Amino acid sequence: MSLTALHSPSCAYYKNELYVAFYAGEKECVSQRVLIFKKDKGKFTLFKQLPIGSGNPVLMVFSDSLYCCYSMFTRPMANNVFDLWKTTYTCVQDLMSEKNNKYVLGTYCCPRVNPYYFNDGSLVLPCYDEGIERGVLFHFGKGRLMERYVCMNDFPAIQPSLVHKNGKFYVFFRNFQRNLSYNPSECYAPYAELTFSTARQLVVFGSMKKSGVPNHNESIATFNDREGNALILYNAQKNRKELTLGMLEPDKQGMLVTEPLIVLNETTKASYPNCCFNNKNQLVVSYTAYEKGINHGSAICLTTVSSKYGKVLSRKYITPETLGGIK
């Protein structure tokens, strides 16, 4: 069988060159592995292939090198996706060193969304422990040991994503409740205020709150642009439809809500967004694009948006055909 299930991409610029990582398999969690492509002269070509059983890649730039964070299965792959993801560990691999040094961050843990970068060169990599359904943050500081922090949320919420707004840090989550279709009023992305002090090496999670951002158990990604605006990528409709870029703002009651700016996808469904900025200050968003389901054939789309967020400038696809003879 060929690799037709392409999913969960991440994108990053390293030395002004665009890299995109995603996992591909015969089906989700069947013969899958992480593939890393590099854009060269307008085309995406294979740069590196990670071991069978790897998934959920996130690219990050740290200490003048490009790293890939990814999860690895601890048991043979099968069709029971949920059980597999509950028993993974997270690796970090230096993609640019000759030895491709690899480190293990944590067990039963998955990365998913883009890192949050601080001005001092440090960063936070958001992850989640799907076994206990909690957010996990890894802080990589210049010249310091890595720190790990866990959000003690009181209901299932995974895939945390960091954003800065009005002098405060917030962490948004994917709403992981299973019965949302029976409770439409609960279809929102939860968030919490975050006290983060790099000087004191301290993270304190506030209580979970209800946002005005719709979420039907779908991935989201928050980030700040170079002007400091707080933005969010989310599905405006259920069933992973209308992947939307929005601006985060507080309403009159102080709840964070989203002001929609532009819909990114042209396929029926789009999910698992990740983003970065190019040297023209244009937003580049990678996501899974498909019509039915991932196992029915999916593609990785990289969409470039104008610097004022008013127009989609281009959409480039990596499809199963792009993978050629990779098996």
Image (cartoon, rainbow, N blue to C red):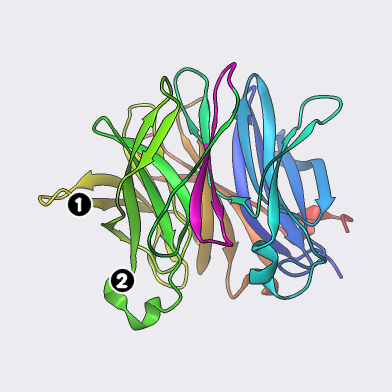
- Mark 2 / mark 1, whichever is N-terminal: 2
Which residue: 47% across, 17% down?
Answer: 120
Q: Position of residue 55 (x, y in %)?
A: 71, 54
Q: Quadrant of residue 91?
A: top right
Q: Amino acid at mark 1?
A: Met
Q: Nearer the viewer, residue 211 or 34?
A: 211
x, y (%) of residue 19?
A: 67, 37
Residue 60 horizontal/vertical position (percent):
61, 34
| Residue that appears at 23% across and 45% down | 249
Residue range in magenta is 125-144
Q: Which residue is mark 2?
A: 186
Secondary structure mainly formed by the magenta segment: strand
Residue 285 visible in rendering: no
320 vs 63: above or below: below
- Which residue is disc 1 drawn over? 255
Point out residue 261 in the picture as x, y percentages from the top left corner: 31, 49
Q: Residues within 10 Å of mark 1 (few under 14, many from 20)?
A: some
Under circle 1, the secondary element is loop
Viewer-nearest residue: 261 or 10: 10
How far, Cα to Cα, is label 2 from label 1?
A: 15 Å
Farthest left residue? 252
Does residue 301 appear left or right of residue 66 in this picture?
A: left
Q: Is residue 232 above or below residue 239?
A: above
Q: Is residue 31 magenta?
A: no
Q: Residue at x 54, y 56 (%)?
A: 272
With respect to residue 78, does 135 lie above or below? above
